[in-house]
Image (tube, grey):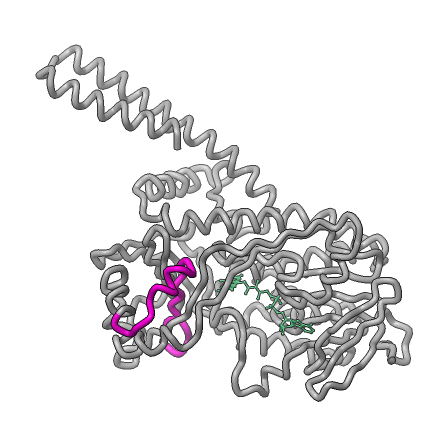
Amino acid sequence: ERSASRQSRKKVVAVVGGGLVGALNACFFAKRGLDVELFESREDIRRAKIVKGRSINLALSHRGRQALKHVGLEEKIVAQGIPMHARMIHSLDGKQSPIPYGRKGQYILSVDRANLNKELLTAAETYPNTKMNFDHKLQDWNAETGLMTFVRLDGSKEQVKADLIVGCDGAFSAVRKQFLRLSRFDYSQTYIPHGYMELTMPPINGEFAMKPNYLHIWPRNTFMMIALPNLDKTFTCTLFMPFEDFEKITTGDEVIEFFQKYFPDTIPLIGADTLQRDYFRLPAQAMVSVKCNPYHIGDTCVLMGDAAHAVVPFYGQGMNAGFEDCIVFDEIMDQFNEDFSAVLPEYTRVRVPDDHAIADLAMYNYIEMRAHVNSKWFIFRKYVDNILHFFMPKTIIPLYTMVTFTRTRYHEAVKRWHWQNKVINRGLLLSAVGAVLGGSYLLIKNPPDSNKLIVSAEKMWDRLVALRTL
Ligand code: FAD
C-alpha cells in the first residue's frame, strides 16, 4: 500500500479515469496546486496503435469550450475542430435543407475524440504536480478508508490512498459501485432500444463528399443517420436504429437494399463495396442513460462526467456537461476554500438538478431528431423561435440556443423553455384568431361562392385545432 502523497502535505486528489472528463479534471485540480494522480485502465492512448472509444468524433459547444478555456486549451482545440453552422436535413428524394443552429456566427464544432483526449492528457502532464498512471484499472475501493485497489495487465495489484477520489471512469464506473451499497443513494439506468453504428464516408477527389460545415441528418422516423466532418476530409456517419432492425440485415445485398430504400444519396458517397464491408465490421453499440443522486460520499469521493450522468447522445451534450461539471466544481472549491466536507455536498446540491435536466432533454431529443425534424410544424416553430429571438434576444431564447450557446443552468433552460412555449403558442393562436376575424369581415363584405367558403372554414378550423394542441 502506498499513499499518493509526496513530501509536501498538500491534499492529494486521485482522478480515476483518463478519458475526456478525467484528463480535463486533472488539469483543473493541478492548476489549483493540489497533488494529482490520474489512474487510467487503458494503456497511454498517445502510444497505442488502436484507440478504442465511444464515438470517433463529437460536437463541442459553449459549455465545453468554457471549461477548456479555463485551462488554456480552448484556442488550440477549436483550431483543430470543424465549425458546423446548421443541420443539413436530407429528405428521401435527396433534397437538402439547412436549419441553422442559432444566429449568424453561432456554430458547434466537430472534434476528433482521440485527438482531444490526447491533447488533454498532454496538458495534464505539463503540470509538475501531476502523476499519470496508465494500465491501472480500479478494481475496488473502501468508502471508509479511501483505500483504492488497482489491477495491472500483468495481474499485479497496487493499493493507493488519497484525500479525494474523483470518479471520472465513465458510464460503467467502478467508483460508483461503492455508492450502490449506500442507503438513500438513488440510481437508475435505462438502455434505449436503439443502437449505433459508425460508417466512414471517404473524400471524393481529395475533397469532402458533402458540404463540410454542417451536421448532416437523414431523419427517417423510427431511425436516422447523422454525419459529422473530420479534418482528413472524411465524414463519420452514425446510423441510429433499433437493435432488432440492425439484426434483420444479414447480407451485403440486404445492406444495399436498405440504403437504397432509406439513404439512396449516400450509396455513391460511401461506396457500395465499403458499405457492404463496414456494416458487418462491428456490431451496433448500445446506448445507456444513467442518473444518480447524490454525487458524493462524505468528504472523500465525488463522481463527474458519464460516471455521474451518462446521457443518450442526441443533444450533443454528454461531454459538454461533463466538462461543465469541472467548472462548477472548481467554482465551489473557490467558494468553500477547498474544504471538501463543504464542497462535496454543495456540488451535489447544485449539479444534480442540472445533470438530470440534460439527461431528460437528451432523451426528449432522441424522439425530436428522428421524427420532428421531418415535420413542417417543427421547422415552422424553429423559424418562429429564431425570428422572435432576433427581435427580442433577451425575452425569447430557443431551447437549443440556451443549451448549446450559453451556460444557462440546464434546469433553468428547461423551465424557461416551458414558459416560452406557452407564450409563443398563445401568441400564434391569437394571430390565427385575428386572421379568422379579419377574413370573416372581408367575406361578409364580399360574399364568395358558399361551397368554397365551407372548405376554407374547415381548413382554418383544422389549423386552429393544431395550433391549440401542439
Ligand atoms: P469516458 O469517455 O467513458 O471515459 C472514461 C475513462 O475511464 C476511459 O478512458 C476508461 O478507459 C476509464 N476507465 C473505465 N473504468 C475504469 C477503471 N475501473 N479504472 C480506471 N479507469 C477506468 N458528447 C458531446 O458532448 N457531444 C457529442 O457530440 C457526443 N456524441 C456522442 C456520440 C456517441 C455515439 C456517444 C456514445 C457519446 C457521445 N457523447 C457526446 C458523449 C460523450 O462521449 C461522453 O459524455 C464523454 O465521453 C464522457 O467522458 P468521460 O470522461 O466521463 O467518460
Rendered image quadrant of residue 459? top left
94 shown above or below 447: below
**In front of the other: 466 or 117:** 466
Residue in the image at 84% along x and 77% along y: 4
Point out the image quarter for the N terminus: bottom right
Image quarter where ligand 1 lies: bottom right
Percent coordinates x, y for residue 16 in the rendering: 72, 71
| Drawn side of residue 137 relative to residue 60, left or right | right
Q: Is residue 237 left or right of residue 462?
A: right
Residue 218 colored magenta? no
Residue 295 percent location from the top left of the image: 73, 55
- Front residue of 201/204: it is 201
Quarter of the picture holding the C terminus: top left
Query: Is 115 drawn above or below residue 289 in the view shown?
Result: below
- 385 left or right of 149? left
Residue in view at x 68 percent, y 82 percent: 135
State the residue lying farthest toward the top: 444
Q: Position of residue 123 (x, y in %)?
A: 65, 77
The residue nearer to you, when weighing 274 against 454, is 274
Q: Please state if 190 lies on the left or on the right of 108 as rendered.
A: right
Q: Which residues are magenta?
A: 229-253
Q: What residue do we see at 64% from left, 51% from top?
A: 188
Residue 447: percent from left, percent from top: 12, 13
Q: How many marks?
A: 0
Q: Indicate yes or no whether the magenta region holds residue 243.
A: yes
Name above or below for residue 402 compared with residue 277. Answer: above
